[in-house]
Amino acid sequence: MRILHVQRVKGIGGSERHLLSLLPELERRGIHTQMVVLRTGDGDRFVDAMRAADVDTLAVHGGGHVQPGLVPILVSKIRHFRPDVVHTHLVDADVYGQLAARLARVPAVSSVHGTPAFYGREPYRTAGRVAGRLARRRIAISRHVAAFLVAGRLAPPSRIRVVPYGIALDEPVDGEDAARAATRARFGWTDREFVVGIVGRLIPGKGHDRLVRAVARASAAHPELRLLVVGDGPTRADLEALIRDEAATERVELIGFVDDVRPYVAACDVIAVPTEPTLSEGFGLTALEGMAAAKPVLVTRVGSLPEVVVDGSTGVVVEPSSTQALADALVDLADDPARGAALGKAGRARAEQEYGLQRMVDETIAVYEEVA
C-alpha cells in the first residue's frame, strides 16, 4: 500500500510530532509513505526531521492560506507517486489536498487535530464542510474532536473514525533515572528541587504566562519549586518579560526548542498542560508524554485534556483561567510526593493500555483499508 500525506507546516507542534511518530512506523509495516510539506515559517525544521527519519519528503512553498495554485501542484505529486490513499492534515491541506485527490481520482482521508474556532465563521466553515464531504473518512484524534465535527457538520457521522494519538512505550521508566540526573545537573538542580515542566510552542492560549504566575505564588509555600519551559515561538519575548516582572528569573529555565523532549520530561516531577479555553486542544500530546514517563500530569478542563488525564487517578484537572487553582494544585503535589508518584504510575499504566504507538498505527491502517 502507498500513502501520500499532505500538511501545511510552519513549525513543529503536536500534529507534526504525531506525523514524526506515525510515518516511520508505517514504513516499518511495509506501507510506502510520502510526505508533501506545504512549507511556511519554520517548516524546514520539520522537513529535515522527517528526512532524518528516512521518510520520503517533498517540500512545496505553502505561502498564505489562499493558494489555489497548490491544487494542480498536488495533483501532479499524486499522479507521480500513485498512492492508494491521500491523507491530509489541517485545514489548508484538507482543502487543497482533498480537491487534488478528487481530481486525480484517488480516495482520500483527512485527520482533524483540533477544534479551532475559525470553523464557526466563513469562509472556513464552508471550506471545512466541503473537505469533510470530499474525504472518504475523517479521523478525529479524540472523542472531543469527533463531537466537534458532528456539531459543526464538518463530516457525516458515518465517516468519522476516532484514532487517538499514540506514543512509543518501548523503554522502561526505570531507565530514565540517568537522564533525570544529567538534565538536573545541567541546571544546578538536585533531588531537593521540585520541578514543574511545560512542553510546547510558545503561542497564545497555551497557558505559559498563567503557569509562570502560579509557580511564583506556589513558591511562597515551596521555595524549592522550579519551572522548566521547553519550546519556542512568537510569545517568547513576552514570556521572558513576565518572568522578570514576577522576579522568577532564578526559578524558571526557558530552554527553547529541542529535538528530543524525553530527557527534560524525565527531569520533572510534574508535567503541566495549562491550556486556555481560547485555544483548541484536540488531544494534548504533552500530557501523554508525561504519562508515558510516569509523571503526574496537571491539566486544565479544556478540550480533550480531561479525556486523556483522569482527574485524581492519573493526574489533576483544574478549571481553566485560574492562576490560583494551578498554584494550589502545585502546592498539593509538592506537599505529597508519594501521591504524585502514585498518579504517575497509574498514568503510565493508562498510556500502555490506551495510547500505545502500535495501537494508533493499527487503527490508522484500518482506516486506509476501508477506503483503498
Image: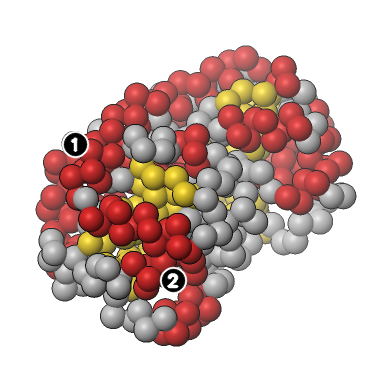
Q: What residue is rendered at 53% in x and 78% in y?
A: 238
**Numbered tag placed on residue 172 in the rendering:** 1
The quadrant holding residue 369 is top right
Look at discs 2 and 1 and give the one toward the viewer: 2
Please rate how many residues cluster around mark 2, counting C-alpha atoms within 10 Å: few if below 14, some from 14 to 19, many from 20.
many
Left or right of residue 27, residue 99 in this image: right
Left or right of residue 242, residue 60 in this image: right
Instruction: Kindly tell me whether residue 180 is visible in this rendering.
Output: yes
Please rate how many residues cluster around mark 1, counting C-alpha atoms within 10 Å: few if below 14, some from 14 to 19, many from 20.
few
Amino acid of disc 1: Pro
Viewer-side residue, 223 vs 98: 223
Locate residue 79, reporting x and y percent. Answer: 70, 33
Q: What residue is rendered at 56% in x and 59% in y?
A: 321
Left or right of residue 195, residue 150 in this image: right
Locate residue 102, reporting x and y percent. Answer: 79, 30
Query: Residue beneath label 2, please?
Result: 213
Viewer-side residue, 106 vs 17: 17
Above or below, comparing residue 179 to residue 185 in the picture:
above
Q: What residue is rendered at 81% in x and 56% in y?
A: 66
The quadrant holding residue 67 is bottom right
Locate residue 278, reporting x and y percent. Answer: 65, 56
Above or below, comparing residue 15 to residue 2 in the picture:
below
Locate residue 355, reporting x and y percent. Answer: 40, 30
Viewer-side residue, 222 vs 10: 222
Mark 2 or mark 1: which comes first in sequence? 1
Secondary structure at numbered mark 1: loop
Instruction: Kindly tell me whether residue 57 is visible in this rendering.
Output: no
Residue at the top extreme?
370
Amino acid of disc 2: Arg
